[in-house]
Amino acid sequence: MKIAFVCLGNICRSPMAEFVMKDMTNKHIINSFATSAYHIGEDMHKDTKELLIKNNIKCDNFICRQISLEDVKYHDIIFALDDEILNTLQNRFQEHKNKIQSFCTYCNLGYKNVPDPWYSGNFEEVYMIIKHSCKNILKAIDEENINCN
């Protein structure tokens, strides 16, 4: 399965989700993207990278990218890290709305959105939410309880 994670800038949440998921499985193609063009070509946020390294998660060769129609067509499922991103993606790529889901659908910790640590500074909280939700996503994929068309 080809999985994409999307946030606003592709420097904090979505790259964290990409590399956490890659650390959990090698069965799937996993990428991350931004809806904005703010950080295209840059590395992930230094605090995201430090947290991943601290948790022994390999995160080399990362470059921020903005999602395109080709990316949407290529991936089987696209996870938006918050409702604003979900709405942006569904409006921008209306023909592929069925592929786009809320990441927090797989979070049973009481979160409706993954908070943006760019603003909150709480990278540990985001890591906890992402790790938990990625495990649930993989379980749903293995049990074929995930909707991706």
Image (tube, rainbow, N blue to C red):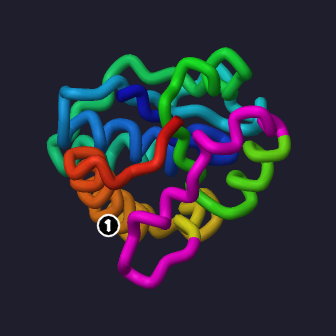
Q: How many marks?
A: 1
The answer to which image quadrant residue 21 occupies is top left
Q: Is residue 74 above or below residue 7?
A: above
Q: Residue at x 54, y 62 (%)?
A: 117
Residue 145 placed where, x, y %?
33, 54
**4 sits left or right of 83 in the view:** left
Q: Nearer the viewer, residue 4 or 50?
A: 4
Q: Is residue 42 above or below residue 148?
A: above
Does residue 106 belong to the magenta stretch? yes
Residue bearing mark 1: 128
**38 sits left or right of 33 in the view:** right
The answer to which image quadrant residue 61 occupies is top left
The answer to which image quadrant residue 91 occupies is top right
Residue 9 placed where, x, y %?
66, 41
Q: Is residue 49 above or below residue 143?
A: above
Residue 105 placed where, x, y %?
48, 66
Q: Is residue 44 visible?
A: no
Q: Residue at x 21, y 27 (%)?
A: 27
Residue 128 placed where, x, y %?
32, 66
Does residue 21 belong to the magenta stretch? no
Which residues lie in the magenta part? Answer: 92-112
Q: Nearer the viewer, residue 120 or 114?
A: 114
Q: Residue at x 77, y 30 (%)?
A: 37
In the structure shown, which secondary structural element does the residue marked by tag 1 occupy? helix
Q: Is residue 133 above or below residue 142?
A: below
Q: Residue at x 27, y 34 (%)?
A: 22
